[in-house]
Amino acid sequence: MSSPEPAIEANGLRKRYGDTAALDGFDLVVPAGTVHGLLGPNGAGKTTAVRILSTLLRPDSGTARVAGFDVVRAHQHVRYRIGLVGQHAAVDEVLSGRQNLVMFGRLYHLGTRAAERKADELLNRFRLTDAGNKPVKQYSGGMRRRLDLAVSLVLAPSVLFLDEPTTGLDPRARNEVWDEVRGLAATGTTVLLTTQYLEEADQLADAISVIDEGRVIAEGTPDELKRRIGADRIDVVVHDSVDLGRAADLLAKVAGAETTTDVDRRQVSAPVHDRMAALTELVRAFTDEGLAAEDVALRRPTLDEVFLRLTNHEKERAA
Amino acid sequence: MTTTTLPQPPGTLGERLRWALADGWTVTRRDLAHRARQPGMTVTDLLFPVMIMLMFGFLFGGAMAVPGGDYTEFLVPGVLALTMVFGVEATFTAISTDAARGITDRFRSLPMAPSAVVVGRCGADMLGAVVTLTAMVVAGLAIGWRWHGSLAAALAAFGLLLLLRLAMLWLGIYLGLVMRSPEAVMALQILVWPIGFLSNAFVAPGTMPGWLGTVTEWNPLSATAGAIRELFGNPAWAADSWLSQYAVLAAVAWPAVLIAVFCPLSIRRYRRLSY
């Protein structure tokens, strides 16, 4: 067999809503068996992309193939091979977890017996057996999410779409979802995950596409992207805003990089490469200069900074 | 490469039809399961129209003089028709709640027949209407209402009532897909009242100011109520206008027009969810 076809392949997808382009030439290739993160701010087009790839929405132009089938022309074939977990847990609140699984199994055209067997198997796997006959209304947020995920796995899909699967979950429930995604990836399921959290993509994804204004603006492994974005940052808060200028000069010298100043928070910050060395050197420089710092902190770049940097680069290139 | 046995998409027309019915039935059964899980809700749904019937029957029964009969005989068919119109709320709520919670999207991402959501809703609501009608007929008989025509005529009357419910079903589906917010149910709950009362359900249009009487006459609810009074052999109260002469015809035509308008609109709207 020749090199296997990618599990997800999108070429030049476009989708407009009135005057706004939700997707504006969206390209994506996800090799089979990998976890791919689609990272972007609200309104970047992540959900539109997932809705097109999961056959819920028709693109205005462009093509996409999922699990080997065209999402528009062969949508019925695609639907037997995908699972979709949307932003809200799309399960019936009145029915029990088991009733939900059996109903969706029937709608995947499993026989009654097969649907019931599958339901029990999934309840067990997602640690919902005890709550299986209780109405979903009584489930916690994490349990609902697990049931939602279980429903999307009724047919053991080869491609799973997760649209912001951990939004609104507490850290424990979030970790549970992450574990499940890792487990699925280990069994060879291709996962496309959208998220607003850099950390989530970092934890789960083999590769990340950063999306903004309907297009992919950067792509790579989490490490590659971080290197591109810049290393850790150092933030210094001074006592008195009149010292901001001097603090910025010192920080620029130590970091060897451009600094940004936030007057309201009396803060200067800059990217640094060797975090510990930069920190000691900066503290020494401040002591030597007799400058008082209220707070000095090292931190990873935030998603805001990632976007600011990536989108600014885009705009510079366009200018 | 391992091959997993996936169900195949239905190919022939016969297979597609079979799956459309099977999927529709699965969605209907979901609603039946809701009723089984929330028996209290079903009882409340039944109590409300029965309560209206009893309230009006006992409150106004003494004060209303219906030419050629008593008020209960006049009222019961009116409330039966009114209940069919109020059914629009149930349909609307079910459709808009599913859309808002993302369940409609999940259904649409499954390989099920696209018609199943609507066919299933239709099955569930029509079954619900039969249950409601049965309960109300029992309550009506208990307060002294009788039908005087033939069994065939009575069955035709129930047929007209269900036809009106079917029209309201399509209206409800369309509104539920368009408004897509469960909050809109508040507006609908208020709006059904003037539609319910500006009809001949409780009093004859002839007793109203002229213009209001005309509006009332043209209410689809009045058409059905007038027609089933005729079929049940219950007093119709001043049947002199052109519309009330052809009540049965109007009771077929009105729902037919509503279905002809809102069924295609709903299907189009449902399809447009993917644009």
Image (tube, coloured by chain):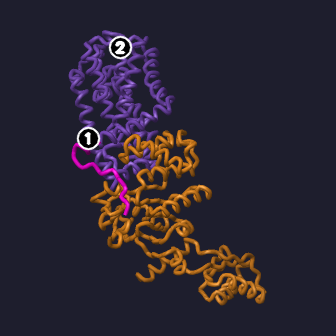
- Residue A183 screen position, x and y as percent: 52, 60
- Please state the total of marks drawn on the protein image: 2
Frontmost residue, A281 versus A174: A174
| Mark 2, residue position | B73
Asked if residue A103 can be seen in this view, the reply is yes
| Mark 1, residue position | B261
- Residue A25 screen position, x and y as percent: 35, 71
| Magenta span: chief secondary structure | loop
Where disc 2 sits, the SS reads helix
Q: Quadrant of the N terminus of chain A?
A: bottom left
Which lettered chain is shown in purple?
B
Asked if residue A24 can be seen in this view, the reply is no
Instruction: Report the amino acid beneath label 2.
Output: Glu
Q: Earlier in the sequence, mark 1 or mark 2?
A: 2
Please report the bounds of the magenta region as a residue range.
Answer: B1-18
Residue A52 part of the magenta segment: no
Instruction: Report the amino acid beneath label 1.
Output: Val
Q: CA distance from mark 1 to mark 2?
A: 33 Å
**Chain under callout 1:** B
Frontmost residue, A41 versus A111: A111
| Residue depicted at 58% across the width and 42% down the height | A130
Q: Quadrant of residue B170?
A: top left
Q: Decide: marks 1, 2 in contact (CB < 8 A)?
A: no
Residue B13 part of the magenta segment: yes
